[in-house]
Amino acid sequence: MATLAMPQVDALREGFADAVRDLKVNLGNIASSDVLEADQIWGIALASAYYIGEPRLLSALLADAHAGGMSGNALEDARSAAGLMGMNTVYYRFRHLVDKDSYTQKPARLRMQAMVKPKTTKANFELFSLAIAALAGCETCIKAHEASVIQHGLGEDHVHEAVRIASILQGAAVALRTS
């Protein structure tokens, strides 16, 4: 459905060491999807990069997204998803891992307005959030956001692509640190 130009990301991956050549190829493959729209690819990639926190990767993706015409609303949702999921994945993973009613019955008291009223669509925001939930390994968050993505009209192929892109970016961040 979408194929994006990512010249800054391409330049970054050219510097990868030969030991991580598979990631060099994989990173080049995040720019194309049979099911995702352009803003979905950008949003997943940027939300993931914000969460991962590798500055060179984030800088390259931001430059390419701006040059590639990413909407301001999608960029804002990517930032919001990264911040909220940075909080939620810690909180909900704790509740899941401890598995005590005394914690799960307490109100979360975490403000999440950006998730309730995203700038793009609920489906897109949930897709961005799902990518981060996968990066964080929060089972509760993964299940909740996967179900919400489906509920809001996207399919399992969208879910798969979001997690694929997030995992490649995590590997790329490691590759950058080892190159």
Image (cartoon, rainbow, N blue to C red):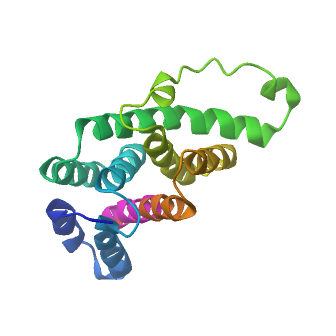
Which quadrant does the C terminus fall into? bottom left
Query: In the picture provided, is 31 more to the left or to the right than 11?
Result: right
Residue located farthest toward the right when viewing the structure as drawn: 101
Q: Where 130 sits versus 162, above or below?
A: above
x, y percent for residue 3 = 26, 67
Name the magenta segment's main secondary structure: helix
Q: Nearer the viewer, residue 72 or 172?
A: 72
What's the magenta region? 166-177
Residue at the front extreme? 153
Residue 15: where, in percent of width, then height?
A: 20, 71
The residue that appears at 16% across and 46% down in the rendered structure is 66
Looking at the rendering, in which quadrant would you find the N terminus?
bottom left
| Residue 92 position by quadrant | top right
Residue found at x 41% / y 50%:
48
| 115 part of magenta stretch | no
- Measuring from the top left, give residue 140's x and y in whole percent: 69, 44
Q: How many marks?
A: 0
126 w.r.t. 88: above or below: below
Identified at 50% across, 60% down, the residue is: 163
